[in-house]
Image (cartoon, rainbow, N blue to C red):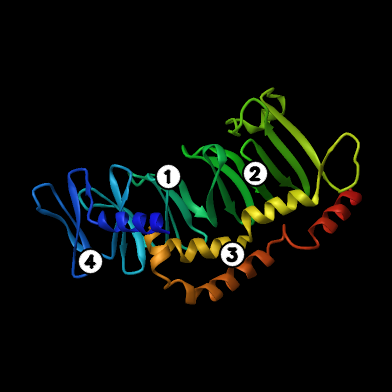
């Protein structure tokens, strides 16, 4: 507990940080930026200013977020309700259905067209668009198109994907961490990877790996609930991408039930999810 309090104190002390010969200062509960000679570069008009890499800042004005450069020029419009700093030098910004990933120069590594963007092992990003999942990297390269009903990683070197009701597993056999090649269509011929068709069955299935209840349990524990996870992203991380705000400020709590209900309803409407999906997929396979 003492270590935690010491960490919080350390972060609070450095709220007015020197960054690239600049200082973030506060005046009347607003934040601005001064240069090394204490000249004001950016007037104190922002609710928050958060460092982003070495070239920019995430800023909050009223309830909206955007990105400015070291001179205060707007790189990404201050119009987004949700923000998350990713790996220190990327920012995920969005409202509902228009999340994008931006680097410290304001360049859209991933365009603002996604319902969600989340980190995966191996320097990869899980994207979600129109009820389908895909995978991209931090260069903006699309590694897997948004055509999958589900994607998750039970281990750093294993990825499981559901495509048209069928489960597949990709394992990086030459490394402890999975990194997908740029041309995923040839992955089955790549000796670094092992691709397996998974059968949803707890019995003994000859010639196949079996997707058991344990696998679903791992997935449940790792993701909890898509609706809950999205709600936490939208409310807690929208406090300004600062760990201190999440612990100290609880202003997001009253909005949780409404936002959770909206996200839950959206997931219930997902045509590729739900209790009858496996039954429908079996019927489809028999009709072929």
Give the alpha-carbon distance from disc 1 to disc 4, as whole Å. 26 Å
- At x 37% / y 59%, what residue is drawn? 5
Q: Nearer the viewer, residue 200 or 143?
A: 200
Instruction: Label 4: state its secondary structure.
Output: strand
Q: Which mark is residue 87?
A: 1
Q: Earlier in the sequence, mark 2 or mark 1?
A: 1
- At x 26% / y 54%, what residue is drawn? 14
Q: Earlier in the sequence, mark 1 or mark 3?
A: 1
User: In the image as oriented, which residue stretches furthest toward the top?
Assistant: 191
Give the alpha-carbon distance from disc 2 to disc 1, as whole Å. 19 Å
Proximity of marks 4 and 3: CB atoms separated by less than 8 Å: no
What residue does disc 3 label?
228
Q: Earlier in the sequence, mark 1 or mark 4?
A: 4
Q: Quadrant of residue 82?
A: bottom left
What residue does disc 2 label?
153
* Residue 81 in view (yes/no): no
Residue 228 lies left or right of residue 63; in this view the side is: right
Q: Nearer the viewer, residue 179 or 80?
A: 179
Q: Residues within 10 Å of mark 4 (few under 14, many from 20)?
A: some
**Residue 28 screen position, x and y as percent:** 19, 70
Residue 122 lies left or right of residue 27; in this view the side is: right
- At x 48% / y 73%, what residue is drawn? 253
Give the alpha-carbon distance from disc 4 to disc 3, as whole Å. 32 Å
Vertical position of residue 273 compared to residue 170: above or below = below
């Amino acid at each position: 507990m003492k270590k935690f309090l010491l960490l919080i104190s350390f972060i609070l002390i450095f709220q007015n940080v020197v960054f690239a010969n600049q200082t973030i200062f506060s005046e009347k509960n607003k934040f601005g930026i001064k240069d090394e000679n204490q000249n004001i570069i950016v007037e104190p008009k922002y609710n928050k200013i958060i460092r982003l890499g070495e070239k920019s800042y995430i800023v909050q004005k009223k309830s909206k977020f955007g990105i400015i450069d070291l001179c205060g020029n707007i790189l990404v419009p201050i119009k987004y309700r949700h923000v998350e700093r990713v790996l220190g030098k990327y920012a995920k910004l969005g409202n509902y259905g228009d999340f994008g990933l931006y680097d410290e120069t304001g360049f859209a590594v991933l365009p603002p067209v996604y319902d969600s963007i989340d980190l995966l092992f191996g320097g990869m990003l899980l994207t979600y668009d129109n009820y389908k999942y895909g995978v991209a990297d931090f260069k903006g390269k699309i590694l897997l198109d948004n055509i999958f009903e589900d994607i998750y990683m039970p281990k750093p070197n294993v990825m499981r994907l559901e495509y048209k009701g069928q489960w597949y597993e990709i394992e990086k056999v030459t490394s402890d961490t999975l990194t997908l090649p740029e041309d995923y269509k040839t992955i089955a011929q790549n000796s670094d990877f092992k691709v397996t068709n998974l059968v949803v069955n707890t019995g003994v299935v000859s010639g196949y790996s079996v997707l058991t209840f344990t696998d679903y349990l791992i997935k449940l524990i790792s993701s909890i609930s898509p609706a809950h996870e999205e709600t936490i992203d939208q409310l807690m991380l929208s406090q300004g991408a600062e760990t201190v705000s999440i612990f100290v400020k609880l202003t997001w709590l009253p909005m949780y039930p409404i936002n959770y209900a909206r996200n839950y309803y959206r997931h219930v409407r997902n045509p590729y999810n739900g209790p009858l999906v496996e039954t429908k997929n079996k019927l489809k396979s028999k009709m072929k």
